[in-house]
Image (cartoon, rainbow, N blue to C red):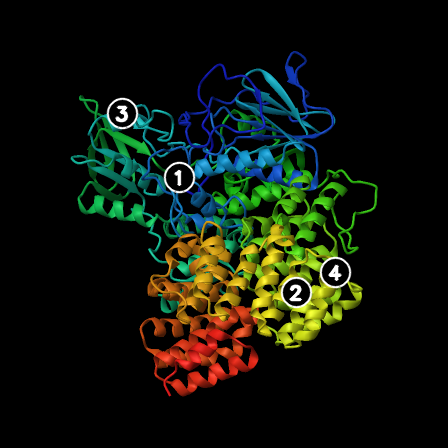
Amino acid sequence: MPEDYVSPHREPHTPHTSPTTRTHHTQPTSHTQPTQPTQPTQPTQPTSHTQPAPPSAHIQPTPSGPHTVAVVGVGAAGTLTAVHLCETATRRRTPLDLVLIDPAPEAGRGVAYATPDPGHRLNVPTGGMSCYPDDPGHFTRWLCRHGEPTVTGGDFATRYRYGAYLADTLAQAIVRAHGVVSVRRMRTRAEDCAGTTDGRVVLGLADGTRLAADAAVLATGPAGPTAAWAPGELREAPGFIASPWASGALDGPLADGADVLLVGTGLTAVDLALTLDRPGRTVHAVSRNGLLPQPHALTPAGSMQAPEGLYGSSLEQLRRIVRHHVARSVRLHGDWRPALDSLRPHTARLWQDLTLEERAELISVDGALWNTHRHRMAPATAEAVARARTAKRLVVHAGSVTRAAVLDDGSLSVGLSGDRELNVGWVIDCTGPGRRPDGSLWGSLLASGTAVPGPLGMGVATLDGRLLAAEGRTGLPLYTLGSPRRGELWETTAVPEIRVQAAAVAQALLAPLAPRRRTSRRPLDGHGLALSTHAEAAAAYRTGLDRILKVRSGAEDALRRAVGLDPGFALGHAALALLGHECGAAVDVPRSLAEAQRCARERADERERSFVEVVTRRVHGDNGDTALVRHLEAHPADALALAAAVPTIAFSGVDDLDDAYALRLVERTSPAYDGHWFHTSLLAFLRQEQGRLHEAGELAHRALAAEPASGHAVHALTHVHYETGTHRAGRDWLERWVAGRGRGAVHRAHFSWHIALHELALDDPAAVRRRWFAQLAPGRVTGVRALVDSGSLLWRARLSDSWRGELPTSDVLDSVEADVLERPATAFTALHSAVTLTAAGDLTALRRLRDHASGADEVQRDVIAPLCDAFTALIEERFHEAALGLHSLLPVLRRVGGSSAQREVVEETLLYALTADGRSDAARLLLDARLQRTHSPRDLRLLSQLPT
């Protein structure tokens, strides 16, 4: 079966089940071995959807008040539904009683993800298997946090690990939903369903309980195989295995070495062929066409847009369009896969556009070819299959089973079309799921007319997931997803489709329920802007915002508290995403951003939605600065947005606009702040960037008089001291502040870096070394700050000959995550990554950074990529080339953001390259220009050392 396919827990033949349990957590996700399921029981007598529950039945009570939703089946489809129900209800603060019904010991596995065989891998890369359609990297990040730190979105995880991920994600969703969603886990089966007079449903359970619910989701997965193709003699033979994933089904073929025949050549057959492969055994596989699934490419070839003219076309026209599209893909990429992948988002609508006759023809004529190319093997799986075929341990046949007989020794003689005969010990049905949902529950629904077969008899008829009764009527509040919707959607059995359906079902079930609303006026932030949350969360948000504006620690914790108090608070999630993206805070940025987007759609005003859009664009590198400017023009009092726009100590600021735009932005927003210390602090910083140092100093002092803890004002005054050459006074003043008011500063390392810059300028190498080891060495500084401050200081000390011996750059690099180092999100981080890699002489990593920058946002392409080339030339001692490259970048360097003191490292590297290239005259001109800007004993020494 395809590894991205969802299968049900096959319900065991047990007369009794474990007692109903009530819990706020799921079973353990990594240590519990799941029990392989068996075949379902036969359908019970049908129950009409209008028939009330029998008086003698014990009806399981449901809590009075909260809406009750039952999810039948907690394989992958049911788990995804439960996750989205928990999270949607929590965001909306909608009380919900969620009942999960399934006898399986663990949620999330079903049949597809219960197999512990490490050879059974997903057939979709990890980047396509997230629980969340709007957060595709969620599964990959989960793997990185759970023992596989080097995994990428293009790798193929084991199916058992994916089951653990589903269970853990549900457990986390339940924990976060505590207080809003009550979760009950009932370890039993649902066997029938009836309606009530008030429009609810009553589920009859195998333990005799009848559960009343306001709605139910039937997440039962694909139907079991029917073995209709098998001759009667074969179906009755002891060596025939009709359900290979049932518990103990493979014990026989695993225990002996007899040859095996797999009927079917899809992904189920591939998995079983690998499981049963052993020396001395031949595994045969037969299907009408004899085609095995195609492999995924080792390296993806790229992506394509879907071709035009798809919609409204006949089947014959579609065939022609797809053939031309595939041919174009081969010409462009040397591979057909990008063409087929581009069709995936469109298949459901294309299927619905076809007539019933065309759909039937598509399945019979094109189905096998489509399936073998669309549902592929992981590369490692394909390699193992190829080895088995080369060794003749796996033999694939085209044809069908025509007859079978049990021989005297118990083995099977199986005839294939074309007068071929095989003698095998076992025949295993790998033909895939049946056309229609099975089991007693579905049997009762179909028999009563509560559910009717879907188009072409495939699945059941639904309207956006809600079951349709006879004559197309919507009857009971019953929903389904995944395989039962095959007739309606065709491509609907893979996780990327089911997760979208799960989110839609959650929305549909909760849409009619009014969330708890407060009658009081909305609370305000510290600048008079309304917040779409309650008073407690607003208070936590104001604390976080205040700490961000003061550049003090604790902002992240306060914002986490805000969204913990109100998970539906879009602005809180967006602020966390911004801190993680631009400030290196320990935030799961994609997760926070996805939460912000979901919350903004459900509960936010225009200003909050605009801010979420700003953060989204900045994270994705998609015209983020333009969106930020538009936002501030409409909402000038949004202090967090203004902080993000100004390149100071906290944020990189706008970078793809002209140099003076940030200043004009601050000046235009001035009326909204009326001399507030935060706004005055930003203006002070920008005035010093203009070179208006005296005015900048006055503004900084004014802001500090109003708020002595204002980190922005301190930062501005620090730059004034540095740019005016008052290094001793600046060093002493800043050291006093850091030891006093600055104790709670979130960027104390950066202020220490500024003190070290004064010490470098004073030509005091011993002080620089003491400062680095005491305040800037990894352990005291980590993450992005280690690059921006610690790494750049080491390189600047080496450039001016102020650090003798080996640079401890390896310590800095070890403290930074590989993604931050080689795939930075911003040009500002990329600049400092390049500097530190150059200090370490790591050419390989520098080239990887250059490759990343070449495909990243415009600033990284235009500035960082050529900067990496110049630094590479420097390491390789091609000093003339390095100097040319560095000199050409000086005029555009402001685009990376940050301050002139931070970007000065490139100018100092240019000075080093000029000196090493023997171009003393050019080096002297550069030093003279630097000394005209500011006095520096170090630069005077370097000037005196130049050859005359």
Q: Position of residue 560 (x, y in %)?
A: 63, 44
On screen, residue 855 above or below 219: below
Mark 4 or mark 3, which is nearer the start of the sequence? 3
Q: Earlier in the sequence, mark 1 or mark 3?
A: 1
**Discs 1, 2 touching: Cβ within 8 Å:** no
What x and y, as percent, mark residue 99?
60, 28
In three-dimensional space, the C-alpha distance between marks 1 and 3, rounded to whole angstroms, equals 23 Å
Residue placed farthest to the right in the image? 520
Q: What amino acid does circle 4 point to?
A: Ala
Asked if residue 754 lies left or right of residue 850, the reply is right
Dot 1: what SS?
helix
Give residue 275's quadrant in the image.
top left
Tell me if label 2 and label 3 are in contact, CB under 8 Å.
Answer: no
Q: Quadrant of residue 563?
A: top right
Mark sitting earlier along the chain (4/2) = 2
Which of the marked residues, 2 or 3, is nearer the chain's N terminus?
3
Q: Which mark is residue 705?
A: 4
Callout 3 touching callout 4 (CB < 8 Å): no
Q: Amino acid at mark 3?
A: Gly
Query: Dot 4 lies on which element?
Result: helix
Q: CA distance from mark 1 to mark 2?
A: 42 Å
Q: CA distance from mark 1 to mark 4?
A: 61 Å
Q: Which residue is mark 3?
A: 252
> Does residue 248 lie above or below 229 as drawn?
above
- Nearest to the eye among marks 3 and 4: give it: 4
Q: How many marks?
A: 4
The residue under label 2 is 628
Which residue does the numbered mark 1 point to in the structure image? Answer: 159
